[in-house]
Image (tube, rainbow, N blue to C red):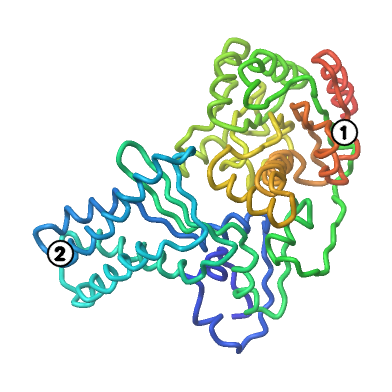
């Protein structure tokens, strides 16, 4: 092969990478990693592993009258998880975090895996075989991940519901793990339209090593986009309930300035749904499209097909930042003329994000930026990048949040955002949008 085009998994995932190509130093490979802003979180997933108590119990029931020796091994795993769940109850966040691998649990999982393998190699037909095989693979991944465990890992146990518990070996920093697959190439080029701040991505992808880097200017005329910041609305979690009506008013004002197709991105489904009811009161029902929580590929295609260059009336799609419509869609020309971004894209607060924050606070004092601010702003950049797709596209971008005018966010702005304007109210915003469209 002169060229292999594949998902990240086939190069970086220790479970499925292409051994026949990459286990022998016979080819001078160069890795070209597209959309590289996605690799850090993908790599964290590849080098993490989890199990839950419910899966253990379900398999135990399935094997009960068939393989008593395996049931005994599953019981040992379940007993350990039960004790750990009791320990979680006393923890403030309902989770127990440890900085050493869980040796007793690993020992019990290894004993089960060895026993399961003895039966699986017999290749006997059984109604429970697939369920057993899937759990065996989960255990294999857990044991493999335990071998990687070092200072860039944590082990945590988190309660789920009334009786379940999840155990996870969680990779905090993907750079040390990516070093091995990257050594299989002579050279690697990471690229993306949103690798900003670039030092942050260099740290997550390659560690502290210094490598050549280059930022290219946008090839699209700056005057083809009108970029506005509405900084009089706070979308912080504690203030969201106070923002719904004003948000709906701003969105309505944007849509009324020019007929066309628009996308409005929210930080969560809950926020979207809260504003949706108010928008239904202001806009004709046929003008609203909504990203659903679960959508098939066919549903997504239908959603995007509505964004036609031949639409005679305004159409607005409501979507979630970081979701399936947040990046990777190409609505050229009149298929999309405007994007409204609600908030700075900060990921939902949670245990894993907090663990990443604590880790990078220890490393460099930049925990909040690494865990929340930078990943969030990357979502914002991806959302705004849906508008201008060719040299002749024209469109508008409205960023809604007072934080966009703070210095810690302004310093993240890409160079082609140099024409950004701040507006204080809907009247001022409407005047600037009308002026932009009058120049078309």
Taking 60 as reference, is 229 above or below it? Answer: above
- Residue 420 numbered tag: 1
Q: Residue at x 57, y 64 (%)?
A: 8
Residue 324 % position (x, y): 56, 43
Taking 219 as reference, is 182 above or below it? Answer: below
Left or right? Give the position of 304 relative to 90.
right
Residue 351 % position (x, y): 53, 44
Q: Residue at x 84, y 62 (%)?
A: 214
| Image quadrant where residue 102 sits | bottom left
| Image quadrant where residue 176 sits | bottom right
Residue 378 % position (x, y): 70, 45
> Which quadrant does the C terminus fall into?
top right
Proximity of marks 1 and 2: CB atoms separated by less than 8 Å = no
Give the mark count: 2
Q: Which residue is mark 2?
A: 126
Residue 385 % position (x, y): 73, 43
Structural crowding at the residue carrying mark 2, measured as other residues with C-alpha within 10 Å and reported as few (<14), some (14–19) or many (≥20): few
Q: Residue at x 87, y 33 (%)?
A: 420
Distance of label 1 from label 2 (alpha carbons)? 64 Å
Q: Secondary structure at mark 1?
A: loop
Q: 367 or 21: which is nearer to us?
A: 367
| Image quadrant where residue 271 sits | top right
Which residue extends farthest bottom? 26
Q: Does any portion of residue 174 appear in the rendered image?
A: yes
Q: Earlier in the sequence, mark 1 or mark 2?
A: 2
């Amino acid at each position: 092969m002169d060229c292999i085009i594949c998902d990240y998994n086939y190069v970086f995932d220790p479970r499925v990478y292409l051994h026949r190509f990459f286990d022998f130093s016979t080819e001078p490979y160069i890795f070209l990693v597209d959309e590289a802003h996605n690799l850090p979180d993908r790599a964290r997933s590849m080098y993490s592993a989890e199990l839950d108590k419910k899966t253990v119990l379900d398999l135990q029931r399935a094997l009960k009258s068939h393989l008593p020796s395996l049931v005994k091994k599953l019981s040992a795993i379940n007993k350990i998880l039960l004790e750990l769940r009791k320990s979680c109850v006393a923890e403030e966040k309902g989770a127990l975090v440890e900085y050493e691998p869980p040796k007793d649990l690993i020992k019990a999982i290894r004993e089960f895996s060895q026993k399961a393998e003895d039966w699986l190699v017999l290749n006997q037909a059984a109604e429970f075989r697939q369920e057993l095989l899937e759990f065996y693979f989960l255990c294999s991944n857990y044991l493999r991940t335990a071998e990687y465990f070092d200072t860039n890992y944590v082990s945590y146990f988190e309660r789920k519901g009334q009786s379940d518990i999840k155990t996870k070996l969680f990779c905090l920093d993907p750079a040390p793990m990516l070093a091995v697959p990257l050594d299989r190439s002579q050279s690697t080029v990471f690229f993306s339209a949103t690798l900003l701040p670039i030092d942050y991505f260099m740290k997550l992808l390659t560690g502290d090593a210094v490598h050549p880097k280059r930022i290219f200017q946008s090839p699209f005329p700056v005057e083809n986009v009108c970029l506005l910041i509405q900084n009089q609305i706070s979308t912080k979690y504690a203030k969201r309930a106070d923002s719904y009506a004003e948000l709906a008013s701003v969105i309505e004002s944007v849509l009324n300035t020019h007929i066309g197709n628009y996308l409005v991105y929210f930080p969560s489904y809950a926020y979207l749904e809260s504003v949706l009811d108010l928008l239904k009161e202001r806009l004709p029902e046929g003008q609203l499209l909504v990203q659903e929580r679960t959508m098939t590929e066919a549903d997504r295609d239908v959603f995007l097909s509505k964004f036609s260059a031949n639409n005679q009336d305004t159409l607005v799609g409501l979507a979630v930042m970081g979701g399936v419509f947040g990046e990777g869609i190409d609505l050229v020309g009149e298929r999309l003329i405007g994007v409204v971004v609600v908030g700075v894209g900060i990921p939902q607060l949670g245990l894993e994000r907090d663990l990443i924050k604590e880790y990078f606070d220890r490393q460099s004092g930049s925990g909040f930026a690494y865990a929340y601010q930078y990943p969030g702003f990357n979502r914002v950049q991806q959302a705004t990048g849906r508008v201008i797709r060719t040299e002749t596209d024209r469109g508008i971008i409205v960023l809604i949040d007072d934080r966009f005018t703070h210095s810690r966010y302004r310093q993240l702005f890409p160079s082609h955002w140099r024409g950004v304007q701040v507006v204080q109210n809907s009247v001022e915003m409407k005047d600037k949008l009308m002026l932009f469209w009058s120049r078309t």
